[in-house]
Image: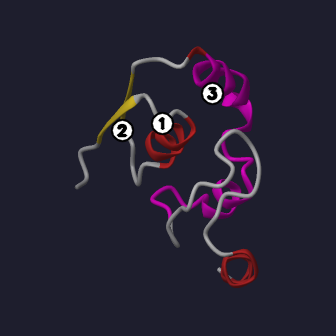
Amino acid sequence: MLIQNTLLKKEGTKVLQGPLRGLDFTEQSAERCHIAKLLGCYEQPLQPYITTAIEKDYATILNIGCAEGYYAVGLARAMPGTTSLALDTDP
């Protein structure tokens, strides 16, 4: 928690790198990997697919199991003309 609090104090809640860079995220994450999300390396294995999706400019993106919406909101921000739908069992 000390590292997370230090990062939040120094950098705020913006994602620092990766295809979702600039996303103004939350102060906590559902899956306990908040630092990786803020640093922009959480999605590293998926980055080629995320970049391809952004470049293809799909009309709609559906994120099932979205938790706090990291991908749904990040992709909506990166693709302003795309409808982003997000569903999760936890309100």
Q: Of circles 2 and 3, which is in front?
A: 3
Highlighted range, magenta: 29-55
Q: Nearer the viewer, residue 31 or 19?
A: 19
Amino acid type, callout 3: Ile
> Which residue does the numbered mark 3 point to in the structure image?
50
| Alpha carbons under labels 1 and 3: distance apart | 15 Å
For residue 55, side relative to residue 79 (left or right): right
Number of other residues with Cα within 10 Å of mark 3, as a class: few under 14, some 14 to 19, many 20 or more: some
Mark 2–mark 3 Cα distance, whole angstroms, equals 17 Å
Of callouts 2 and 3, the N-terminal one:
3
Secondary structure found at label 3: helix
- In this rendering, the answer to whether 65 lies above or below 49 is below
Identify residue for label 2: 65
Callout 2 secondary element: loop
Residue 49 included in the magenta stretch of the image: yes
Q: Nearer the viewer, residue 18 or 89?
A: 18
Helix, strand or loop for the magenta stretch, by majority? helix
Q: Position of residue 76 (x, y in %)?
A: 46, 39
Decide which of tag 2 and tag 1 comes sooner along the chain.
2
Task: Work out which residue is located at the far front of the displayed protein and give it.
Answer: 81
Q: Is residue 63 visible?
A: no
The colour style of the image is secondary structure
Which percent across, then down, holds residue 53? 58, 20
Q: Looking at the picture, does residue 67 appear above or below residue 71?
A: below
In magenta stretch: residue 67: no
User: In the rendered image, which residue does mark 1 sit on?
Assistant: 80
Amino acid type indicated by mark 1 = Pro
Quadrant in the picture for residue 1: bottom right
